[in-house]
Amino acid sequence: MQTFNKTWTRFLAEAAVLAVIFTLGQYAITTGLLNQYYQINLNSICINIILAVSLNLINGFTGQLSLGHAGFMAVGAYVSVIMTNRLDFPFILAVLAACTAAALAGFIIGVPTLRLKGDYLAIATLGFGEIIRVVLQNIDYVGGPSGIMGIAKLTTWAWLFGSTILTLVVITNLINSSYGRAIISVREDEVAAELMGINTTRYKVLAFVIGAMFAGLAGALYAHYFYIIKPDTFTFLKSFDILVMVVLGGLGSTTGAVIAAIFITSLTAALQSFPAIRMILYALILIIVMIYRPQGLMGNKEVGRKTLARMWGEKK
Amino acid sequence: MSLMEIRGLHKSFGGLSAVLNFNFNLEKDELVGLIGPNGAGKTTVFNLITGVYKPDEGSMVFSDHTLMGLHPYEICKRGIARTFQNIRLFRDLTVLDNVRIAFHKDVGYGFMSAIFRSPAFFRGEAEIEEKALEFLRIFKLDNKRDEVASNLPYGEQRRLEIARALATGPTMLILDEPAAGMNPQETQELMQLIQWLRTEFKLSILLIEHDMALVMGVCERIYVLDYGQVIAEGKPEEIRNNKKVIEAYLGEEVN
């Protein structure tokens, strides 16, 4: 009971900190302290955090190499836009529908492909991601190759902030539970995990579905910020971008995924001033990081309450 | 009725018959050894029993239920646990987490409880941790609970693997060369540990071992496997003097 009370106190303290951060952000946006350019970057950072953290659940914690994340993002984006733009549903229902549809797509794709391992799984998920894109390209109802324009800008700071925190909380809580240990055991040694009574197929699919669901959430937020969506936004290159964040941050580190998402998004934005050598610099930075930190920025370590508490203690 | 009864088990890989017409019995509380030269098919038998491989033919019955067609995790839930010849720990996880995973199959809280951190989650986690620590204490690993498994010395990795297997709550324990790589002193300790575990946890044990001192010392009955077939079965002293067994190990006498 004592640990439970302590948890509540900690929870309230953390909620207070988050509320302060949120209010500061909201203040900066409404007063114009954060101009349009920075707002767009902030938006991209939040969306990329959701994408990277959710892909890390599949690639980093479950150890299943998936390259189809952009496909699930596309499902979320299109479903949410159909809901708001075509069917006039409120945004919240559109977001829920986007998550559900992406999770369902994750289940349908996950069940047959997760029997495969390593490179084979990577190629299968890559293929499925592309199939989703090509299918969208050929449906006239959603505008075919030119996509849908005139999407209402419904993604507010509150939505972005709330969704990012929700993603982090759900995935962190999942990983730090018995279910999370079961998921990680699949990555560590699938045979041993099976013989410890873990239904490995079930946990692979579970991680895949949850990962896809959050990609759908990111897709919905993305679509309702940038006015237009088209199939070309969700090519496998988008999946690779997310994968780069996960690998750069360190496979199996949520903190790493967050840091890498912030780093890469900011880097891409900063390099826009040098259009000619942008991709060269981008690649060079990645290569240098991978040479000096092959395990990723964070390895499989996390910065969490314990680390912060330790740093706090040392300062005192 | 035996605890485990295997009849006519057959497994081939391509053209090679790894296990041929394997018949086997294990009574409750019995400690049985499976020996044989390298490549005789011993580990294949273990993989068949635990569902890692699917047998081509035959029947396997464990406490009145068939094991045929079950997944390894289902077989684990029926009460069979095993260790591996080449240790298979969850290498990047801590000692405590390695054992905690074994309790997942009986986890006392739901998926949603985990995500929303309900009281059931905290109760369940505390219970799992307490039970896991108990096993670590038995195997004298409790002072290493937060150590990463791959950093443990070899002997402790072996002990951790046994601890993890027992944590799944088996009635039958399968040990694949538990003494491999151990010195005589460690082997001696292992023998005592096996004997003790057996009475403490009321286990039936099946073990593969090359260390004859250990096999002859602890096993009540021995099966000898050669080229996938049982060539002899009996008490240790019978096996020691069995002509076929000596031939399988040392070759025929030249006149």
Image (cartoon, coloured by chain):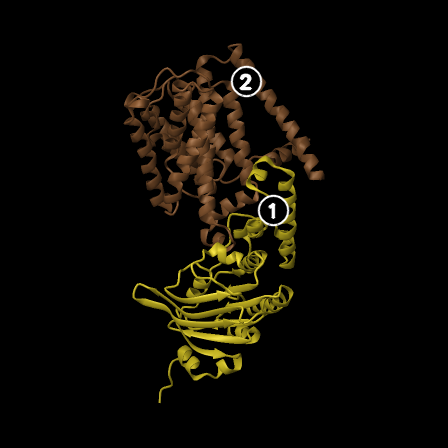
Chain colours: A brown, B yellow
Q: In this view, does B190 lie above or below B160?
A: below
In depth, the one of A306 and A166 nearer the eye is A166
Tell me which amino acid carries mark 1: Gly
Q: Residue at x 70, y 35 (%)?
A: A5
- Residue A212, picture quadrant: top left
Q: Position of residue B201 (x, y in %)?
A: 62, 63
User: Which of the numbered marks, if any, corresponds to residue A67?
Assistant: none
Label 2, label 1: how many angstroms apart (C-alpha)?
Answer: 40 Å
Q: Can residue A245 be seen in this view?
A: no
Given contact means CB atoms under 8 Å apart, are the residues at marks 2 and 1 in contact? no
Q: In this view, does B247 lie above or below A153?
A: below
Report the side of A239 relative to B217 (left or right): left
Tell me the residue that label 1 is attached to.
Answer: B108
Chain hosting mark 2: A
Secondary-structure class at tag 1: loop
Q: Is residue A13 visible?
A: yes
- Residue B189, picture quadrant: bottom right
Chain hosting mark 1: B
In depth, the one of B54 and A171 nearer the eye is B54
Tell me which amino acid carries mark 2: Gly
Q: Position of residue A10 (x, y in %)?
A: 66, 31
User: Which of the numbered marks, if any, corresponds to residue A25?
Assistant: 2
CA neighbours of label 2 inside 10 A, class few (<14), some (14 to 19), many (20+): some
Q: Position of residue A200 (x, y in %)?
A: 46, 49
Report the side of A186 relative to A71 (left or right): right
Name, please, the residue furthest toward the bottom. Answer: B255
Q: Do the residues indicated by labels 2 and 1 lie within the same chain of the protein?
A: no
Secondary-structure class at tag 2: helix
Q: Position of residue B203 (x, y in %)?
A: 59, 66
